[in-house]
Image: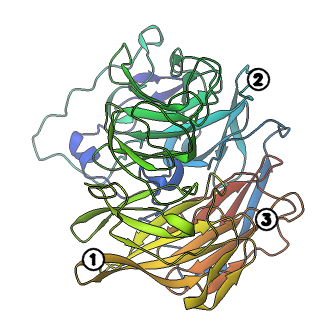
Amino acid sequence: MGKRRFAGFTIMGCAGLMCLSQAALSQQAPRGDWTIIGNSPEQSGWQKVEKKLSPASVPTQFKLLWKIALGTPSKARKNFDEPLLISRTINGQGFKDFVYVASSDTVYGVDSELGTLLWKKEYALKGTGCAAPSVSIIMEPPAVINFNARRAPGAPPPPNPPAVEPGERRLGAASGGGGFGLKGVYALTSNGMLHEQVVTTGVDFAPPIKFFPSAAGASAMNIIGKTMYASAPTACGATPAGVSAVNVTTADYPAAHYDLPKGASLVGTGPILAADGTAYVVTGAGTGGDFHANSVVSLGPDMKVKNWYTPTGTVAALNPLPFTFKTRQLVAAAGKDGSIVLLDAAALGGSDHKTALSETSPISKAGTKHAWDGLATWQETDGTTWVIASVSAPVNMPSLKGVAAHGALVAFRVDDADGKPVLTPAWISEDMVNPTPARIANGIVVALAGGNATTHARLLVLDAKTGKELFNSKETLPTYTNKSGVAISDAHAFFTDHNNVLYSFGIALEH
Protein backbone atom coordinates (compact mmCIF):
# COMPACT_ATOMS: atom_id res chain seq x y z
CA MET A 1 0.00 0.00 0.00
CA GLY A 2 1.39 3.40 -0.98
CA LYS A 3 2.36 5.95 1.63
CA ARG A 4 2.82 9.67 1.37
CA ARG A 5 4.97 11.53 3.85
CA PHE A 6 3.78 14.84 5.20
CA ALA A 7 5.78 17.27 7.31
CA GLY A 8 6.28 15.65 10.69
CA PHE A 9 4.32 12.40 10.27
CA THR A 10 3.27 9.69 7.81
CA ILE A 11 -0.23 9.07 6.55
CA MET A 12 -1.58 6.31 4.33
CA GLY A 13 -1.94 7.43 0.73
CA CYS A 14 -4.99 7.53 -1.50
CA ALA A 15 -5.24 3.75 -1.76
CA GLY A 16 -5.51 3.38 2.03
CA LEU A 17 -8.20 6.01 2.56
CA MET A 18 -9.94 7.42 -0.48
CA CYS A 19 -9.11 9.64 -3.41
CA LEU A 20 -10.35 13.14 -2.64
CA SER A 21 -11.53 15.46 -5.41
CA GLN A 22 -11.56 19.22 -5.50
CA ALA A 23 -15.35 18.93 -5.17
CA ALA A 24 -14.77 17.36 -1.76
CA LEU A 25 -12.85 20.44 -0.72
CA SER A 26 -15.21 22.99 -2.25
CA GLN A 27 -18.33 21.46 -0.66
CA GLN A 28 -17.08 22.01 2.85
CA ALA A 29 -19.11 21.31 5.95
CA PRO A 30 -19.08 24.02 8.65
CA ARG A 31 -16.49 23.57 11.37
CA GLY A 32 -15.75 25.48 14.51
CA ASP A 33 -12.14 26.50 14.05
CA TRP A 34 -10.80 29.53 15.94
CA THR A 35 -7.60 30.52 14.16
CA ILE A 36 -7.02 34.14 15.24
CA ILE A 37 -7.96 36.43 18.11
CA GLY A 38 -11.66 37.18 17.86
CA ASN A 39 -12.21 34.40 15.29
CA SER A 40 -12.00 36.78 12.31
CA PRO A 41 -9.72 39.49 10.92
CA GLU A 42 -12.29 42.01 12.24
CA GLN A 43 -12.06 40.37 15.70
CA SER A 44 -15.84 40.06 15.75
CA GLY A 45 -15.75 37.41 18.50
CA TRP A 46 -18.61 35.53 16.83
CA GLN A 47 -18.53 31.73 16.46
CA LYS A 48 -21.12 31.37 13.72
CA VAL A 49 -21.31 27.58 13.41
CA GLU A 50 -21.87 26.64 17.06
CA LYS A 51 -25.08 24.60 17.60
CA LYS A 52 -24.79 22.83 20.96
CA LEU A 53 -24.35 25.84 23.21
CA SER A 54 -27.62 27.76 23.57
CA PRO A 55 -29.69 29.61 26.17
CA ALA A 56 -31.57 26.34 26.71
CA SER A 57 -28.58 23.97 27.08
CA VAL A 58 -26.10 26.06 29.06
CA PRO A 59 -27.93 26.23 32.44
CA THR A 60 -28.09 22.44 32.81
CA GLN A 61 -25.13 21.11 30.82
CA PHE A 62 -22.30 23.70 30.84
CA LYS A 63 -19.52 22.90 33.32
CA LEU A 64 -15.75 22.60 33.84
CA LEU A 65 -14.58 19.71 31.65
CA TRP A 66 -10.84 19.64 32.27
CA LYS A 67 -7.76 21.68 33.02
CA ILE A 68 -4.07 21.09 32.36
CA ALA A 69 -0.94 22.81 33.63
CA LEU A 70 1.25 23.58 30.63
CA GLY A 71 4.56 24.23 32.32
CA THR A 72 6.23 26.66 34.69
CA PRO A 73 4.57 30.06 34.37
CA SER A 74 6.81 32.88 33.23
CA LYS A 75 7.22 36.16 35.09
CA ALA A 76 7.84 37.96 31.81
CA ARG A 77 5.40 40.37 30.23
CA LYS A 78 2.63 38.63 28.30
CA ASN A 79 0.84 39.73 25.17
CA PHE A 80 -2.94 39.51 25.12
CA ASP A 81 -3.80 36.20 23.48
CA GLU A 82 -6.40 33.47 23.10
CA PRO A 83 -6.13 29.72 22.52
CA LEU A 84 -6.37 28.73 18.85
CA LEU A 85 -8.50 25.79 17.77
CA ILE A 86 -8.74 23.47 14.77
CA SER A 87 -10.82 20.33 14.43
CA ARG A 88 -10.72 17.05 12.54
CA THR A 89 -6.99 17.18 11.86
CA ILE A 90 -5.09 13.97 11.12
CA ASN A 91 -2.04 12.97 13.11
CA GLY A 92 -0.47 9.57 13.75
CA GLN A 93 -3.38 8.65 16.06
CA GLY A 94 -6.15 9.52 13.60
CA PHE A 95 -8.45 12.52 13.64
CA LYS A 96 -7.80 14.97 16.46
CA ASP A 97 -9.16 18.33 17.61
CA PHE A 98 -6.31 20.61 18.68
CA VAL A 99 -6.08 23.63 20.96
CA TYR A 100 -2.90 25.73 20.76
CA VAL A 101 -1.58 28.01 23.50
CA ALA A 102 1.44 30.37 23.54
CA SER A 103 3.34 31.30 26.68
CA SER A 104 6.28 33.69 26.85
CA ASP A 105 8.67 31.20 25.18
CA THR A 106 6.71 28.05 24.23
CA VAL A 107 3.81 26.95 22.02
CA TYR A 108 1.72 23.99 23.21
CA GLY A 109 -0.51 21.64 21.21
CA VAL A 110 -3.23 19.98 23.32
CA ASP A 111 -5.97 17.46 22.56
CA SER A 112 -9.00 19.72 22.97
CA GLU A 113 -11.35 16.89 23.89
CA LEU A 114 -9.17 14.97 26.34
CA GLY A 115 -7.01 17.77 27.73
CA THR A 116 -3.74 15.93 27.13
CA LEU A 117 -0.52 17.51 25.90
CA LEU A 118 0.37 16.33 22.39
CA TRP A 119 3.43 18.48 21.69
CA LYS A 120 5.29 21.62 22.68
CA LYS A 121 7.80 23.83 20.88
CA GLU A 122 10.27 25.87 22.94
CA TYR A 123 12.09 28.91 21.56
CA ALA A 124 15.41 30.14 22.86
CA LEU A 125 14.42 33.71 23.65
CA LYS A 126 16.22 36.37 25.63
CA GLY A 127 14.79 39.64 26.83
CA THR A 128 16.14 42.98 25.65
CA GLY A 129 16.09 46.40 27.19
CA CYS A 130 12.59 47.07 25.84
CA ALA A 131 11.12 43.67 24.98
CA ALA A 132 10.66 40.74 27.34
CA PRO A 133 10.46 37.24 25.81
CA SER A 134 7.07 36.67 24.22
CA VAL A 135 5.35 34.52 21.58
CA SER A 136 2.20 35.35 19.64
CA ILE A 137 0.49 32.75 17.44
CA ILE A 138 -1.92 32.75 14.53
CA MET A 139 -3.16 30.30 11.91
CA GLU A 140 -4.63 30.23 8.46
CA PRO A 141 -8.02 28.51 8.33
CA PRO A 142 -7.25 24.90 7.35
CA ALA A 143 -9.02 23.20 4.46
CA VAL A 144 -12.07 21.15 5.41
CA ILE A 145 -12.57 17.75 3.80
CA ASN A 146 -16.15 16.72 3.08
CA PHE A 147 -16.04 12.94 2.93
CA ASN A 148 -19.64 12.85 1.68
CA ALA A 149 -18.76 14.66 -1.54
CA ARG A 150 -18.41 12.58 -4.71
CA ARG A 151 -16.98 13.17 -8.15
CA ALA A 152 -19.33 13.07 -11.10
CA PRO A 153 -19.60 9.52 -12.57
CA GLY A 154 -16.70 8.85 -14.91
CA ALA A 155 -14.81 12.03 -13.96
CA PRO A 156 -11.08 11.42 -13.44
CA PRO A 157 -9.55 12.36 -10.11
CA PRO A 158 -7.63 15.64 -10.07
CA PRO A 159 -3.84 15.47 -10.07
CA ASN A 160 -2.39 15.13 -6.60
CA PRO A 161 0.47 17.63 -6.10
CA PRO A 162 3.57 16.09 -4.57
CA ALA A 163 4.38 16.73 -0.94
CA VAL A 164 6.89 19.46 -0.26
CA GLU A 165 10.24 17.89 0.52
CA PRO A 166 12.01 19.11 3.67
CA GLY A 167 14.77 20.82 1.72
CA GLU A 168 12.24 22.72 -0.42
CA ARG A 169 9.97 23.97 2.32
CA ARG A 170 9.56 27.65 3.01
CA LEU A 171 7.35 29.48 5.43
CA GLY A 172 3.82 29.97 4.13
CA ALA A 173 3.82 27.17 1.55
CA ALA A 174 1.44 24.23 1.91
CA SER A 175 3.11 21.62 4.09
CA GLY A 176 1.72 18.60 2.29
CA GLY A 177 0.40 17.58 -1.09
CA GLY A 178 -3.18 17.04 -2.23
CA GLY A 179 -6.29 17.37 -0.13
CA PHE A 180 -4.43 16.61 3.09
CA GLY A 181 -2.15 19.64 2.80
CA LEU A 182 -1.71 21.01 6.32
CA LYS A 183 -1.53 24.59 7.46
CA GLY A 184 0.95 25.68 10.07
CA VAL A 185 0.83 27.49 13.37
CA TYR A 186 2.65 30.77 12.83
CA ALA A 187 4.58 32.00 15.86
CA LEU A 188 6.00 35.53 16.10
CA THR A 189 8.73 35.63 18.73
CA SER A 190 9.97 38.72 20.52
CA ASN A 191 13.24 38.72 18.57
CA GLY A 192 11.25 39.65 15.45
CA MET A 193 11.32 36.18 13.84
CA LEU A 194 8.25 34.52 12.29
CA HIS A 195 8.20 30.71 12.64
CA GLU A 196 5.88 28.05 11.25
CA GLN A 197 5.20 24.87 13.20
CA VAL A 198 3.43 21.81 11.80
CA VAL A 199 -0.01 21.75 13.42
CA THR A 200 0.05 18.05 14.33
CA THR A 201 3.57 17.73 15.72
CA GLY A 202 4.99 21.19 16.45
CA VAL A 203 8.15 20.54 14.41
CA ASP A 204 9.67 23.32 12.33
CA PHE A 205 8.07 23.27 8.91
CA ALA A 206 10.55 25.69 7.36
CA PRO A 207 13.29 28.12 8.39
CA PRO A 208 11.91 31.23 10.13
CA ILE A 209 11.95 34.63 8.46
CA LYS A 210 12.63 38.10 9.84
CA PHE A 211 9.33 39.92 10.35
CA PHE A 212 10.47 42.93 12.36
CA PRO A 213 13.96 44.47 11.98
CA SER A 214 14.74 44.05 15.68
CA ALA A 215 13.27 42.76 18.91
CA ALA A 216 10.60 45.46 19.00
CA GLY A 217 8.17 43.70 21.30
CA ALA A 218 5.91 42.90 18.35
CA SER A 219 2.49 41.53 19.20
CA ALA A 220 -1.16 41.62 18.10
CA MET A 221 -0.91 39.40 15.04
CA ASN A 222 -3.65 39.27 12.42
CA ILE A 223 -4.03 37.75 8.95
CA ILE A 224 -6.20 38.17 5.89
CA GLY A 225 -5.59 36.04 2.82
CA LYS A 226 -1.87 35.38 2.75
CA THR A 227 -0.80 38.66 4.32
CA MET A 228 0.31 38.59 7.94
CA TYR A 229 0.11 41.69 10.14
CA ALA A 230 1.63 42.55 13.51
CA SER A 231 2.13 45.71 15.53
CA ALA A 232 4.79 47.07 17.84
CA PRO A 233 2.99 49.47 20.19
CA THR A 234 6.13 51.31 21.29
CA ALA A 235 9.56 51.98 19.79
CA CYS A 236 12.52 49.77 20.64
CA GLY A 237 15.96 51.24 19.98
CA ALA A 238 16.12 52.21 16.32
CA THR A 239 12.90 50.35 15.51
CA PRO A 240 9.89 52.69 15.60
CA ALA A 241 6.44 51.77 16.82
CA GLY A 242 4.06 50.83 14.05
CA VAL A 243 2.54 48.06 11.96
CA SER A 244 4.19 45.65 9.55
CA ALA A 245 2.52 43.49 6.91
CA VAL A 246 4.27 40.57 5.19
CA ASN A 247 2.92 38.64 2.22
CA VAL A 248 3.91 34.97 2.52
CA THR A 249 3.01 33.91 -1.03
CA THR A 250 6.35 34.78 -2.59
CA ALA A 251 9.80 33.64 -1.68
CA ASP A 252 11.20 37.10 -0.91
CA TYR A 253 8.43 37.94 1.60
CA PRO A 254 7.72 41.55 0.58
CA ALA A 255 6.87 43.72 3.57
CA ALA A 256 5.09 47.03 4.04
CA HIS A 257 5.42 49.22 7.12
CA TYR A 258 3.48 51.95 8.89
CA ASP A 259 6.17 53.59 11.04
CA LEU A 260 5.27 56.10 13.71
CA PRO A 261 7.42 59.16 14.39
CA LYS A 262 9.83 59.18 17.31
CA GLY A 263 8.03 59.21 20.64
CA ALA A 264 4.65 58.19 19.21
CA SER A 265 2.87 54.96 20.11
CA LEU A 266 -0.12 52.74 19.40
CA VAL A 267 -2.81 51.75 21.91
CA GLY A 268 -5.11 48.75 21.85
CA THR A 269 -4.19 45.41 20.32
CA GLY A 270 -4.59 46.27 16.63
CA PRO A 271 -4.32 46.01 13.73
CA ILE A 272 -7.96 45.12 13.13
CA LEU A 273 -8.66 44.09 9.51
CA ALA A 274 -11.75 44.64 7.38
CA ALA A 275 -12.72 42.26 4.58
CA ASP A 276 -11.29 44.60 1.93
CA GLY A 277 -7.85 44.53 3.56
CA THR A 278 -8.12 47.89 5.33
CA ALA A 279 -6.27 47.86 8.66
CA TYR A 280 -7.48 49.89 11.65
CA VAL A 281 -5.27 51.00 14.53
CA VAL A 282 -5.63 53.41 17.44
CA THR A 283 -2.82 55.91 18.00
CA GLY A 284 -1.63 57.56 21.18
CA ALA A 285 0.14 60.87 21.62
CA GLY A 286 2.84 62.10 19.25
CA THR A 287 3.59 64.45 16.37
CA GLY A 288 5.35 64.38 13.02
CA GLY A 289 4.88 63.35 9.39
CA ASP A 290 1.61 61.78 8.30
CA PHE A 291 0.74 60.92 11.90
CA HIS A 292 -2.60 61.60 13.53
CA ALA A 293 -2.44 61.44 17.30
CA ASN A 294 -5.19 60.05 19.53
CA SER A 295 -7.11 58.83 16.52
CA VAL A 296 -8.66 55.82 14.84
CA VAL A 297 -6.55 55.45 11.68
CA SER A 298 -7.26 53.32 8.62
CA LEU A 299 -4.38 51.95 6.52
CA GLY A 300 -4.40 50.48 3.03
CA PRO A 301 -2.66 47.19 2.14
CA ASP A 302 0.44 49.29 1.34
CA MET A 303 0.36 50.54 4.96
CA LYS A 304 -0.29 54.12 3.83
CA VAL A 305 -2.81 56.21 5.77
CA LYS A 306 -6.24 56.19 4.10
CA ASN A 307 -8.29 58.13 6.62
CA TRP A 308 -8.69 58.93 10.29
CA TYR A 309 -11.11 59.98 13.00
CA THR A 310 -9.95 62.18 15.89
CA PRO A 311 -12.42 62.54 18.77
CA THR A 312 -12.24 65.35 21.29
CA GLY A 313 -9.80 64.53 24.09
CA THR A 314 -7.69 61.38 24.49
CA VAL A 315 -8.97 58.32 22.66
CA ALA A 316 -9.47 55.22 24.82
CA ALA A 317 -7.65 51.96 24.09
CA LEU A 318 -10.78 50.38 22.67
CA ASN A 319 -10.10 48.30 19.58
CA PRO A 320 -12.23 49.49 16.62
CA LEU A 321 -14.69 47.07 15.04
CA PRO A 322 -15.49 47.07 11.30
CA PHE A 323 -18.83 45.41 10.55
CA THR A 324 -21.75 45.41 8.12
CA PHE A 325 -25.13 46.91 9.00
CA LYS A 326 -27.65 46.24 6.25
CA THR A 327 -25.74 47.45 3.17
CA ARG A 328 -23.38 49.85 4.98
CA GLN A 329 -19.83 49.25 6.08
CA LEU A 330 -19.42 50.76 9.53
CA VAL A 331 -16.75 50.99 12.19
CA ALA A 332 -17.57 51.11 15.90
CA ALA A 333 -14.86 52.83 17.94
CA ALA A 334 -14.10 54.86 21.06
CA GLY A 335 -15.46 58.39 21.03
CA LYS A 336 -15.02 61.32 23.37
CA ASP A 337 -15.55 61.24 27.13
CA GLY A 338 -16.04 57.46 27.31
CA SER A 339 -18.62 57.22 24.54
CA ILE A 340 -18.79 54.82 21.58
CA VAL A 341 -19.21 56.10 18.04
CA LEU A 342 -20.29 54.67 14.71
CA LEU A 343 -18.15 55.76 11.76
CA ASP A 344 -18.56 55.42 8.01
CA ALA A 345 -15.83 53.00 6.89
CA ALA A 346 -15.49 54.94 3.62
CA ALA A 347 -14.95 58.31 5.34
CA LEU A 348 -13.81 58.03 8.94
CA GLY A 349 -14.78 61.21 10.75
CA GLY A 350 -16.22 62.87 7.65
CA SER A 351 -14.61 65.80 5.87
CA ASP A 352 -13.21 67.30 9.07
CA HIS A 353 -12.07 63.91 10.46
CA LYS A 354 -13.94 64.69 13.70
CA THR A 355 -17.57 63.91 12.89
CA ALA A 356 -19.11 60.52 13.66
CA LEU A 357 -22.33 59.17 12.18
CA SER A 358 -23.68 58.78 15.71
CA GLU A 359 -22.39 58.70 19.28
CA THR A 360 -23.65 57.14 22.49
CA SER A 361 -23.80 58.86 25.83
CA PRO A 362 -20.66 58.27 27.92
CA ILE A 363 -20.65 54.77 29.39
CA SER A 364 -17.43 55.18 31.39
CA LYS A 365 -14.97 57.87 32.31
CA ALA A 366 -12.73 59.20 29.56
CA GLY A 367 -9.13 58.05 29.31
CA THR A 368 -6.99 55.10 28.38
CA LYS A 369 -8.11 51.71 29.65
CA HIS A 370 -6.63 48.25 29.25
CA ALA A 371 -5.23 47.56 25.81
CA TRP A 372 -7.43 44.51 25.36
CA ASP A 373 -10.73 46.36 25.86
CA GLY A 374 -12.70 45.64 22.74
CA LEU A 375 -15.91 45.43 20.77
CA ALA A 376 -17.65 42.33 19.45
CA THR A 377 -20.57 41.88 17.07
CA TRP A 378 -23.14 39.28 16.03
CA GLN A 379 -26.38 39.07 14.07
CA GLU A 380 -29.68 37.36 14.72
CA THR A 381 -31.23 35.27 11.95
CA ASP A 382 -33.53 38.17 11.06
CA GLY A 383 -30.51 40.45 10.51
CA THR A 384 -30.73 42.34 13.81
CA THR A 385 -27.17 43.47 14.54
CA TRP A 386 -25.57 43.76 17.97
CA VAL A 387 -22.37 45.35 19.30
CA ILE A 388 -20.98 44.41 22.72
CA ALA A 389 -18.33 46.52 24.46
CA SER A 390 -16.00 45.21 27.16
CA VAL A 391 -14.84 48.00 29.47
CA SER A 392 -12.23 47.60 32.22
CA ALA A 393 -13.26 50.74 34.12
CA PRO A 394 -16.28 51.84 36.16
CA VAL A 395 -19.40 51.79 33.99
CA ASN A 396 -22.51 53.89 34.54
CA MET A 397 -25.55 53.32 32.31
CA PRO A 398 -28.48 55.35 33.69
CA SER A 399 -30.72 54.30 30.79
CA LEU A 400 -30.28 50.67 31.86
CA LYS A 401 -30.20 51.42 35.60
CA GLY A 402 -26.83 49.70 35.63
CA VAL A 403 -23.66 50.54 37.53
CA ALA A 404 -20.46 48.46 37.60
CA ALA A 405 -17.70 49.55 39.97
CA HIS A 406 -14.83 47.81 38.14
CA GLY A 407 -15.98 47.04 34.60
CA ALA A 408 -18.64 45.30 32.57
CA LEU A 409 -19.93 44.18 29.21
CA VAL A 410 -22.43 46.60 27.67
CA ALA A 411 -24.61 45.40 24.78
CA PHE A 412 -26.06 47.68 22.11
CA ARG A 413 -28.54 46.94 19.35
CA VAL A 414 -27.74 48.67 16.07
CA ASP A 415 -30.85 50.54 14.93
CA ASP A 416 -31.78 52.75 12.00
CA ALA A 417 -32.90 56.22 13.14
CA ASP A 418 -34.21 58.06 10.08
CA GLY A 419 -31.51 56.59 7.89
CA LYS A 420 -28.74 57.06 10.47
CA PRO A 421 -27.26 54.04 12.28
CA VAL A 422 -27.30 54.37 16.06
CA LEU A 423 -26.33 52.21 19.04
CA THR A 424 -29.28 51.59 21.38
CA PRO A 425 -28.29 50.34 24.87
CA ALA A 426 -29.88 46.95 25.57
CA TRP A 427 -28.24 45.44 28.67
CA ILE A 428 -25.26 45.64 31.01
CA SER A 429 -23.57 42.72 32.75
CA GLU A 430 -22.87 42.49 36.46
CA ASP A 431 -19.69 44.05 37.82
CA MET A 432 -16.60 42.35 36.30
CA VAL A 433 -12.94 42.87 37.16
CA ASN A 434 -10.96 43.15 33.92
CA PRO A 435 -13.52 41.74 31.47
CA THR A 436 -12.07 40.41 28.25
CA PRO A 437 -13.83 40.94 24.89
CA ALA A 438 -17.18 39.19 24.56
CA ARG A 439 -17.42 35.94 22.62
CA ILE A 440 -20.77 35.06 21.06
CA ALA A 441 -22.20 31.74 19.84
CA ASN A 442 -25.76 30.66 19.03
CA GLY A 443 -27.53 33.21 21.18
CA ILE A 444 -25.16 33.14 24.17
CA VAL A 445 -22.29 35.38 25.28
CA VAL A 446 -19.23 33.89 26.97
CA ALA A 447 -17.79 36.55 29.28
CA LEU A 448 -14.52 36.16 31.16
CA ALA A 449 -13.85 38.41 34.14
CA GLY A 450 -10.08 38.09 34.22
CA GLY A 451 -9.67 39.26 37.81
CA ASN A 452 -6.41 40.59 39.23
CA ALA A 453 -3.78 39.77 41.85
CA THR A 454 -6.40 40.00 44.60
CA THR A 455 -9.51 38.78 42.75
CA HIS A 456 -9.87 35.40 41.06
CA ALA A 457 -11.27 35.09 37.55
CA ARG A 458 -14.87 34.11 36.81
CA LEU A 459 -16.39 32.69 33.64
CA LEU A 460 -19.93 33.80 32.86
CA VAL A 461 -22.37 32.75 30.15
CA LEU A 462 -25.15 35.23 29.38
CA ASP A 463 -28.18 35.32 27.13
CA ALA A 464 -27.01 37.41 24.16
CA LYS A 465 -30.35 39.25 23.79
CA THR A 466 -31.13 40.00 27.41
CA GLY A 467 -27.88 39.66 29.38
CA LYS A 468 -29.55 37.14 31.72
CA GLU A 469 -26.99 34.98 33.55
CA LEU A 470 -27.04 31.34 32.40
CA PHE A 471 -23.81 30.15 34.08
CA ASN A 472 -21.31 31.48 36.61
CA SER A 473 -18.11 29.65 37.56
CA LYS A 474 -18.17 31.42 40.95
CA GLU A 475 -15.27 30.04 43.07
CA THR A 476 -14.11 27.40 40.57
CA LEU A 477 -11.11 29.35 39.24
CA PRO A 478 -8.40 29.77 41.88
CA THR A 479 -6.54 32.73 40.38
CA TYR A 480 -6.63 35.48 37.77
CA THR A 481 -6.04 35.08 34.04
CA ASN A 482 -3.56 37.84 33.05
CA LYS A 483 -4.49 38.91 29.49
CA SER A 484 -6.13 35.71 28.24
CA GLY A 485 -9.18 35.84 26.01
CA VAL A 486 -11.70 33.07 25.34
CA ALA A 487 -11.99 30.85 22.26
CA ILE A 488 -15.13 28.81 21.45
CA SER A 489 -15.40 25.60 19.44
CA ASP A 490 -17.70 22.58 19.39
CA ALA A 491 -19.54 23.39 22.66
CA HIS A 492 -16.27 24.21 24.47
CA ALA A 493 -14.79 27.48 25.78
CA PHE A 494 -11.02 27.64 26.35
CA PHE A 495 -8.76 30.12 28.18
CA THR A 496 -5.60 30.15 30.32
CA ASP A 497 -4.79 31.63 33.72
CA HIS A 498 -1.61 33.40 34.80
CA ASN A 499 -0.19 30.12 36.14
CA ASN A 500 -0.18 28.76 32.58
CA VAL A 501 -3.13 26.44 33.24
CA LEU A 502 -5.44 25.79 30.27
CA TYR A 503 -9.15 25.36 31.06
CA SER A 504 -11.97 23.81 29.05
CA PHE A 505 -15.56 24.60 30.02
CA GLY A 506 -18.52 23.40 28.01
CA ILE A 507 -20.85 20.55 27.26
CA ALA A 508 -19.31 17.08 27.42
CA LEU A 509 -19.25 15.21 24.10
CA GLU A 510 -21.04 11.88 23.81
CA HIS A 511 -18.95 8.85 22.82
Q: Position of residue 235 (x, y in %)?
A: 61, 28
Percent of width and height locating residue 218: 59, 31
Give the vertical position of 30 relative to 136 (above or below): below
Q: Which mark is residue 504?
A: none
- x and y percentages locating residue 432 in the rendered image: 72, 72
Q: Which one is nearer the viewer's eye here, 335 or 381?
A: 335
**Residue designated by label 3:** 457
Alpha-carbon span between mark 2 and mark 1:
50 Å
Displayed quadrant of residue 225 = top left
**What's the residue type where badge 1 is placed?**
Lys
Q: Earlier in the sequence, mark 3 or mark 2?
A: 2
Using a 10 Å C-alpha cutoff, classify the residue at mark 2 as few (fewer than 14 neighbours), some (14 to 19) or many (20 or more): some
Look at the numbered disc 2 and give the secondary structure of its residue. Answer: loop
Q: What number is the disc on residue 420?
A: 1
Q: Nearer the viewer, mark 3 or mark 2?
A: 2
Disc 3 or 1, which lies upstream in sequence?
A: 1
Q: Nearer the viewer, residue 40 or 344?
A: 344
